[in-house]
Image (cartoon, rainbow, N blue to C red):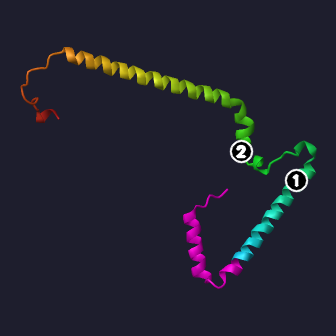
């Protein structure tokens, strides 16, 4: 749910030492661990009660499935996903084909430029200040 990296943990530890002091920190850490354990126990108990009350047909219920984003992805997009994958593959194929065509055109133009003699150098093209 929350992604906390080592940098954030380090900042939290430094802040805790500054705010509470190194003497009280172990006691506070034990209290926080007890609260987290208690909340985890409550969540597991609520989940098991929900499964028991809903009956055996919902025995494989996962609370995360009740998240609307997960629900839509699992139940609605499941049917459409093969079509989406086909469209993505078609776009990739078209992109690959266009890139190959561009490379072929570059090769053709490079070959054509070899056949055309270089124009005589007349200096830079004239510049008209009033035209711009």
- Mark 1 = which residue? 50
Neighbours of disc 2 within 10 Å: few (<14), some (14-19), many (20+): few
Give x and y (percent) for residue 13.
59, 73
Mark nearer the N terminus (1 vs 2)? 1
Q: Residue at x 54, y 65 (%)?
A: 7
Residue sitting at 36 percent across and 19 percent down? 104
Give the number of marks.
2
Farthest residue toward the bottom? 23
Please name the predominant secondary structure of the magenta segment in the image.
helix
| Residue at the disc numbered 2 | 70
Element under disc 2 = helix
Q: Is residue 131 magenta?
A: no
Q: Using residue 29 as the reference point, say whether residue 63 is left or right of it.
A: right
* Quarter of the rendering occupied by the N terminus: bottom right
Tell me where residue 124 sits by quadrant: top left
Span highlighted in magenta in the image: 1-28
Task: Tell whether 119 sits left or right of 88.
Answer: left
Q: Position of residue 91 (x, y in %)?
A: 53, 26
Asked if marks 1 and 2 touch (Cβ < 8 Å), the reply is no
Compared to 106, does 23 lie above or below? Answer: below
C-alpha gap between disc 1 and disc 2:
19 Å
In the picture, the disc for residue 24 is none
Residue 81: image location, x then y, percent:
67, 31
Q: Residues within 10 Å of mark 1 (few under 14, many from 20)?
A: some
Q: Is residue 128 left or right of residue 25?
A: left
The residue sitting at 61% across, 25% down in the picture is: 86
């Amino acid at each position: 749910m929350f992604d906390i990296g080592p940098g954030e943990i380090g900042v939290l530890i430094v802040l805790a030492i500054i705010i509470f002091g190194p003497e009280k920190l172990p006691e506070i850490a034990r209290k926080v661990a007890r609260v987290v354990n208690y909340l985890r126990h409550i969540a597991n108990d609520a989940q098991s009660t929900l499964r028991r009350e809903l009956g055996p047909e919902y025995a494989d219920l996962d609370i995360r499935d009740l998240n609307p984003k997960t629900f839509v992805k699992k139940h609605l997009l499941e049917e459409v996903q093969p079509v989406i994958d086909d469209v993505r593959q078609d776009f990739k194929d078209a992109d690959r084909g266009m890139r190959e065509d561009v490379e072929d055109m570059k090769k053709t133009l490079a070959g054509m430029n070899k056949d055309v003699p270089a124009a005589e150098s007349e200096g830079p093209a004239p510049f008209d200040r009033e035209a711009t």
